[in-house]
Amino acid sequence: ATLWRRSPSAANEVAWVNTSGDTYDIYINIGQYAYWLIAQYDYTGNANVTLHSTPEYSSVQPGNSTSGQTYTLFNSLMKPTAGDVEALSVNGGRLNGPLGIGTDNALGGNSIVFGDNDTGFKWHSDGVLGIYANNALVGYIDNSGLHMSVDVLTNGAVRAGNAKKLSLTSNNNSTMTATFNLWGDANRPTVIELDDDQGWHLYSQRNPDGSIVFTVNGDITANTLRAGGAIYQNNGDIFGSLWGNGWLSTWINNNLVLDVQLGAGTSVTTWNNAGSWPNTPGYVVTSVWKDYQGENIDGINYAPLQKRVGSQWYTVQGGTV
């Protein structure tokens, strides 16, 4: 058998034991620079001990010796490494097999569980990390993002974007729960709908012909509404091509009769006079008069009939014979 001594730098042979029947030859390698050896021995009455020495240094194991099992004994001088004792170094390293923190691991494979044996993370394939709860796959992470197969609940906000973010939040003081839902069927291919516990508020729908309809289940309040090139103002005015690419109020003011009046009147005596009155286009008879004598009227009063378009008054045309 061979005896070894391991130091932090190397493992060295220190002795060899040869056996031949009841005879044991022990060879001790003292070392090249050692100069003293103390040997203590005990033996029974029927055994003899003989000490030999050789003046020549030898580090060669005798040819007829047998090498035995080698064991490493660690101490404060020669401390083990993480690899020596199959431990994970505090400086990092590789762990082969599943890991359980505070429990056994039932997920298996390359996985880590926390608290209970089937809740944690498990490697699926290159770049894919599965998320498990009670041995059920609830989601996974890959290089395209987080994918969840169950509801995502948060007391805070859900934010998307980098420098400019889109947020979905709740102040938690509503009397009802609201839901944005995407659904569709053969007649309504794509519907984006907002509902609460009492019913739907609004939806945007893609029709089978590709057109889009936006429908609100209630009133719409807006400062300005636009439909194509038309504009609906909050004062009721409308802008559009039908009104000459202008406002309806302007078109009405410029094209419709806003008021009617009689202009300055004229009085003429008709008794014993020949003529036709009024003889000016746009003038109308406003009154006639007659005294108690004779049968014919004595005179008439007439005035121009006028209309106002915008801020301008015009005498109406026609009316003469």
Image: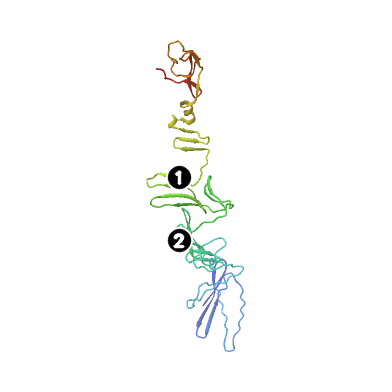
* Mark found first going from the N terminus, 1 or 2: 2
Inspect the image, locate mark 2, and give the three-letter code of the amino acid beneath it.
Answer: His
Distance, label 1 to label 2, CA atoms, is 43 Å
> Residue sitting at 42 percent across and 49 percent down?
190
- Residue 219 at x, y = what percent? 51, 44
Where does residue 81 sit, x and y in percent of width and height? Answer: 56, 65
Measured from the top left, where is residue 129 in percent x and y?
48, 59
Asked which secondary structure carries label 1, the reply is strand
Of residue 44 and residue 258, the one placed in the foreground of this image is 258
Q: Residues within 10 Å of mark 2 (few under 14, many from 20)?
A: some
Quadrant of the image for the C terminus?
top left
Name the residue furthest bottom.
46
- Cβ–Cβ below 8 Å for labels 1 and 2? no
Q: Relative to 164, is 319 above or below?
A: above
Which residue is more in the foreground, 95 or 303?
303
Residue type pointed to by label 1: Phe
Question: Which residue ends up furthest to the left in the rendered image?
Answer: 209
Q: Quadrant of residue 124?
A: bottom left
| Above or below for 254 versus 291 | below
234 or 170: nearer the eye? 234
For disc 2, the marked residue is: 124
Q: Secondary structure at mark 2?
A: strand
Relative placement, left or right, of 155 versus 186 is right
Q: Which mark is residue 214?
A: 1
Q: How is the image coloured?
A: rainbow
Query: Whole-percent x and y of residue 168?
Result: 53, 50
